[in-house]
Amino acid sequence: MSRSGHIFPDIMWRFPFLYLLLLLSCQNSLEDIEQTVGEKRLPDMSGEHAMVYYSDSAVIQLRMEAPLVERYASEDDPVTYFPKGVKAVFYGKTGKEEATLTAQWGARYEKKDLWEVRGKVTYVNVSGEKIQTEQAFWNERKEQIYSDKYTRFTDANQNVLIGEKGFDAKEDLSEWKMRQNRKSQVIVKE
C-alpha cells in the first residue's frame, strides 16, 4: 500500500476530533465577550490645536494649549484628557504670568478640581526655579502641586535638589519641600 493511502484516513479521524475540541473550548457567553472586548467610549467633545482660557472675575488664571483635547462629561466624574501633551501658563491675581507647565499627557478631573500630568513634566516659575518629574498633580482648590515620583528641583542659581520620593509645593513655588531629598553638585560650564 502506498503512503498516500494512509494519510487520508488519518486526516479524517483527526479532523473531526480537532473540530469537536474547538467547538467545546469556545463556549463564551455574550456577557463574557462584551466584558473582554468592552465598549469604546467616545468623548462628548474633542478638539485639535486647542487653546483654552480659565478666568475668575474676568481675570485670566490659566491658559492651556494642547494638540488634542477630549472631554468626557459623565455625571459621576467629568474629565478632560490631553492625550498628546499640554502646555499651561499660570497667571497671578494681577494677570501677570507666574509659571509654565509642560507635559506629554494630562487630565483634569472636574469635580475634584485636580489635574494630573505625566511624561517629562516641567514646571518653571518666573524666578527661573524649575521642577522636573515624570508625574505630578495640581490641586486647584489648595493651590498646590505635588508628586511621589523622583523629582529634580533647580533653583534660580542652578543649584539642584533631588527628591527621591517627590515633592510638595505651592503652585507658585514660593514654598516647597522635597521628599527624601539630597543635594546635587552644581557644575558651571565656562
Image (cartoon, grey):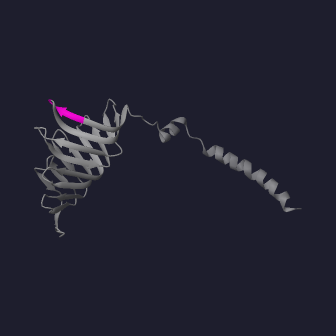
> Is residue 54 shown in magenta?
yes
Q: Which residue is most to the right?
A: 1
Which residue occupies 20% across, 49% down?
A: 146
Classify residue 6 by image quadrant.
bottom right
Tell me: residue 75, above or below residue 20.
above
Q: Nearer the viewer, residue 20 or 34?
A: 34
Relative to 127, residue 61 above or below:
above
Please name the residue shown 17% across and 47% down the image: 99
Q: Give the magenta part as a residue range.
A: 53-57
Residue 177 coordinates in the image, percent (x, y) = 14, 55
**What residue occupies the far front of the structure in this picture?**
190
**Quarter holding the C terminus?**
bottom left
Residue 97 pos. (x, y %): 15, 43
Residue nearer the viewer, 1 or 62: 62
* Membership of 17 in magenta stretch: no
Corner quadrant of residue 24? top right
Name the residue: 15% across, 54% down: 129
Magenta: predominant secondary structure element?
strand
Please give left or right for residue 36 compared with residue 131 in the image. Answer: right
Residue 48 at x, y = what percent? Answer: 36, 38
Quarter of the image where the N terminus is located: bottom right
Q: Quadrant of residue 55?
A: top left
